[in-house]
Amino acid sequence: MTDSGYRRKRDFERTPEPPTTVVTGDVDPLTAPAGDSFVIQQHYATRLHHDVRLEMFNGEDPVLVSWAVPKGLPRQRGERHLAIHTEDHPMEYATFSGTIPEGEYGGGEVRIFDSGTYEMVSRTEDRITFRLQGNRLRGIYHLVHTGVADGKDQWLALLSEDERPPREDPPPLEPMLATLTDGPFDDPAWGFEPKWDGIRALAVCDTSTRLFSRNGRDVTQGYPELAGLHDRLVALDAIVDGEVVAFQNGKPSFQLLQQRMHVREQRRVEALAKQIPVVLMAFDLLYLDGVSLVGRALRERREALEEILVPDEHVQLSPLVEGAGTALYRAAEEQGLEGIVAKRLDSRYEPGSRSRSWLKAKLTYDADVVIVGWTEGEGRRRGRIGSLVMAVYDSDGLRYVGNVGTGFDEAALDDAARRLAEIETTASPFDRSVIRSAPELRRAHWVEPRLVAVVEHRQLTDAGRLRAPSFKGWRDDKPPEECTFDQLQPA
């Protein structure tokens, strides 16, 4: 009997794949005695594919008879997916998950997609019919032999009966929000993450990826480099919570991201994706394989996310440190980050809620404010915008919190002028007492309270003004009414 291709193709001094002294030759899957176990591995080699492996016997020795299936086993009846019969693998391979070094045969990441038992239902001269009972897949499948082409033993995979349990309804696409607190702390019941200076996004993943902003807008078109996120998940389907971030010199840059946030013209989007690539920093998992996870503890959701996510240059797992909030806060300060987020490890996910189970401690503070007007500048800005008039909502309506005149380049000034010109009004949002107390408002040009801006500031003064504000950009994922005084830094 000839030696197995499994051994010939691998250097076991370099690859962590299990060596074997058992596999000799490759059995005929149409006639070899059937075993009862299976494994499917998600393999990031030259191209992503699934390796479907069924236990059969080579004489008295069990082996894994294997097919490489580029699109994975079909999920719908009527789909026909190519499957390439490859060399038999040793039974030890059923638990292999790890990294095959670059340059080795099949180099890339390998993860277990599914495993369990199988039953051989029937076999003919060109067809295998089997039932899977796995953690993810349950049902009856066919593998049909179609012949050899280009030196490859080709088959077709088909779904006969899907026996998976009914799917649960996914949770609302409304992210859970953190409440501002006045500083870091240490507590073993809490986990601590860096606060990323980007925009919130929920990624709905199945056979494609769709991205939704904080207010439910579909922003998929704006970030084409994230279109393959679903391929980086070892899952049938999932909803991942995270932050879309643009990095500059290794640090998040909201101002850089601002250049991409509102662009949707395809050619321009594709050009910006090369100039200013983004990363999704993933930190929570709301839904997995047809099951809602929002009622489960953060610790359990996080473990599931770590298990299914295979990072690359466009999706990363946001670090989580248990217990040591003060140390992470100091590290964030040294790295020039915005701050940290503290999360109770036993907390459930509360869609759309600003919860005390999530707390944010900031180093420099961002405020989401409503722009209600502008004042003219002096010197080089004479006749142009000198500052924007900021307000937030409280129980009495709009409340003045100061003017912002820094943080603009020429392009940002022109963009602001265009936006403001479209919503001009003669009505002041403030009563006369506010105007009297703030002389800078006496010659303000007013606009309708429809625009939300992000400004960075040092603190909220006792008078309720933002100290040393600097303009960072616009937000279109948050309605003005949600910009409230109680969400500003405590005085």
Image (cartoon, grey):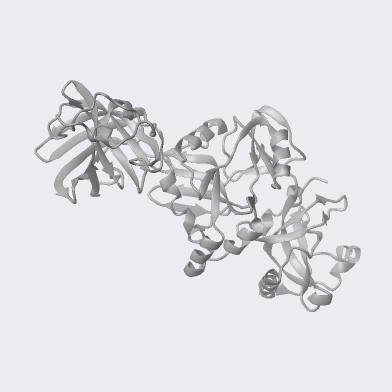
Residue depicted at x 19% and y 41%:
143
Q: In the displayed structure, would residue 295 be above or below residue 171?
A: above
Image coords of residue 9 (percent x, y): 28, 37
Q: In the displayed structure, would residue 101 be above or below residue 78?
A: above
Image coords of residue 323 (percent x, y): 66, 29
Image coords of residue 406 (percent x, y): 77, 64
For the question of whether residue 163 can be seen, the reply is no
Image coords of residue 110 (percent x, y): 39, 38
Q: In the displayed structure, would residue 39 be above or below residue 277?
A: above
For the question of whether residue 279 can be seen, the reply is yes
- In this picture, residue 65 sits left or right of residue 320: left
- In this picture, residue 194 sits left or right of residue 6: right
102 or 222, nearer to the observer: 102
- In this picture, residue 380 sits left or right of residue 29: right
Residue depicted at x 84% and y 76%:
379
Residue depicted at x 48% and y 46%:
312
266 or 429, nearer to the observer: 266
